[in-house]
């Protein structure tokens, strides 16, 4: 039985005589009271680019966003960040003409960072491939107001990129853009022998004798030039379309080679450049290169050899620490390796085998 004088649990204790008590809710006295407003603080912002599913760190609005020296060197394309630490520690990085060994130093906007006498650009390297349409010139700007290829890739990235090599206004096909000046210079050098394949459209079939003469080499503007390979396109039987492979960067010579024999070239399309193709890239569109493609470009340009020298130099400057000779207790001695004799194997006589058994 319930104790007399006690009310059941959960019922509100209302004072019927006082009407004001009926408006209060239970536990009203335990509710958190509003605190007085604090002084105004600096607004906080979230840091973009953080992993999905993880809490983003909150930093103040006026936080220092200048890159550290090792980040600056790594973004310049010299090496990785870990290798950049080794280059800085060994005194191979200069800032404003002085050797700096502090890896966490912030690089100011006006600072001049050098490595082996070369001024570094601390922005992220970009590599963009464009399938150039007809009617665009390969200039950064044009005084006559004509359309340039920069109008097609202006939304590709915030960094300022430049075309590698040139294509004529009426020539279509692959065109590479980058802010990696060292790579662009190496790709345009004749010694690099960058592979290029053009799809050539002619106004009339090309004679086989003209192809053989072209393969032997001709002179254009006083310079001896010749393609690597020239062959008819198998899908077209009339002989008006050819595939031509070159390794020189003179696009004007490609058109001039066929015009030398009296053929008109109404259409010229570059379908391959430095092993890059137009697969899944429609006319007038662009895309960023993948990591494998960037590595391949560096191999073609010979830039990877220079990076290997940098890595080897960084390893040579590391302090060598002797490894302690620790032997495990109760370790079994290593078995001596058996040396095989070069003499031919002969079967043992049966009598000798029986003696051993006895």
Image (tube, grey):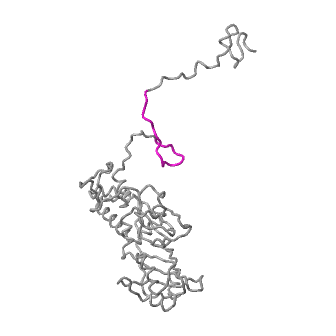
Find residue 147 and report its horizontal and vertical position in percent.
Answer: 47, 64
Q: Quadrant of residue 221?
A: bottom left
The image shows residue 231 at horizontal and vertical percentages of 52, 85
Q: Which is more toward the observer, 178 or 162?
A: 162
Name of the residue lying farthest toward the bottom: 209
Residue numbers of the magenta segment: 39-57
Q: Is residue 41 magenta?
A: yes
Tell me if 8 is positioned left or right of 134 in this view.
right
Residue 323 point in image, percent of width and height: 32, 59
The mark tally for this picture is 0
Residue 27 coordinates in the image, percent (x, y): 62, 20
Report the residue that reaches farthest toward the right.
1
Secondary structure character of the magenta stretch overall: loop
Name which residue lies at 36% across and 48% down: 66
Image quadrant in which the N terminus is located:
top right
Q: Closest to the observer: 351 or 334?
A: 334
In the displayed orientation, state which residue is furthest to the left. Answer: 98
Q: Farthest residue toward the top?
A: 17
Residue 210, compared with residue 53, is above or below; it is: below
Please determine whether, in this image, residue 104 is positioned above or below residue 185: above
Asked whether, in this view, residue 277 is left or right of residue 307, the answer is right
- Residue drawn at (33%, 64%) of the image: 310
Figure quadrant of residue 189: bottom left
50 part of magenta stretch: yes
């Amino acid at each position: 039985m319930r104790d007399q004088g006690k009310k059941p649990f959960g019922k509100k204790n209302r004072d019927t005589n006082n009407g004001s008590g009926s408006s209060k809710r239970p536990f009203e006295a335990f509710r958190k009271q509003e605190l007085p407003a604090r002084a105004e603080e600096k607004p906080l912002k979230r840091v973009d680019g953080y992993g999905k599913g993880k809490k983003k760190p909150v930093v103040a609005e006026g936080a220092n966003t200048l890159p550290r020296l090792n980040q600056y060197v790594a973004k310049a394309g010299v090496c990785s960040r870990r290798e950049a630490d080794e280059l800085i520690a060994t005194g191979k990085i200069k800032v404003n003409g002085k050797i700096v060994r502090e890896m966490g130093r912030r690089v100011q906007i006006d600072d001049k960072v050098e490595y082996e006498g070369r001024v570094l650009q601390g922005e992220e390297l970009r590599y963009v491939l464009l399938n150039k349409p007809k009617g665009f010139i390969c200039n950064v700007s044009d005084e006559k107001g004509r359309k340039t290829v920069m109008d097609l890739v202006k939304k590709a990235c915030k960094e300022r990129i430049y075309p590698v090599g040139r294509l004529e206004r009426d020539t279509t096909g692959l065109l590479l853009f980058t802010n990696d000046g060292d790579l662009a210079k190496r790709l345009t050098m004749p010694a690099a022998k960058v592979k290029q394949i053009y799809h050539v459209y002619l106004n009339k079939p090309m004679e086989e004798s003209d192809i053989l003469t072209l393969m032997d080499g001709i002179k254009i503007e006083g310079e001896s030039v010749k393609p690597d390979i020239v062959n008819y396109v198998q899908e077209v039987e009339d002989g008006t379309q050819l595939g031509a492979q070159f390794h020189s960067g003179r696009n004007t010579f490609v058109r001039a080679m066929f015009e030398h024999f009296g053929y008109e070239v109404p259409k010229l399309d570059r379908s391959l450049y430095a092993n890059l193709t137009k697969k899944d890239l429609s006319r007038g569109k662009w895309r960023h290169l993948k990591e494998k493609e960037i590595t391949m470009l560096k191999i073609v340009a010979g830039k990877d050899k220079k990076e290997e020298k940098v890595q080897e130099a960084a390893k040579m400057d590391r302090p060598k620490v002797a490894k302690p000779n620790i032997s495990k207790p109760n370790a079994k001695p290593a078995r001596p390796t058996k040396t095989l004799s070069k003499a031919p194997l002969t079967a043992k006589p049966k009598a000798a085998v029986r003696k051993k058994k006895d």
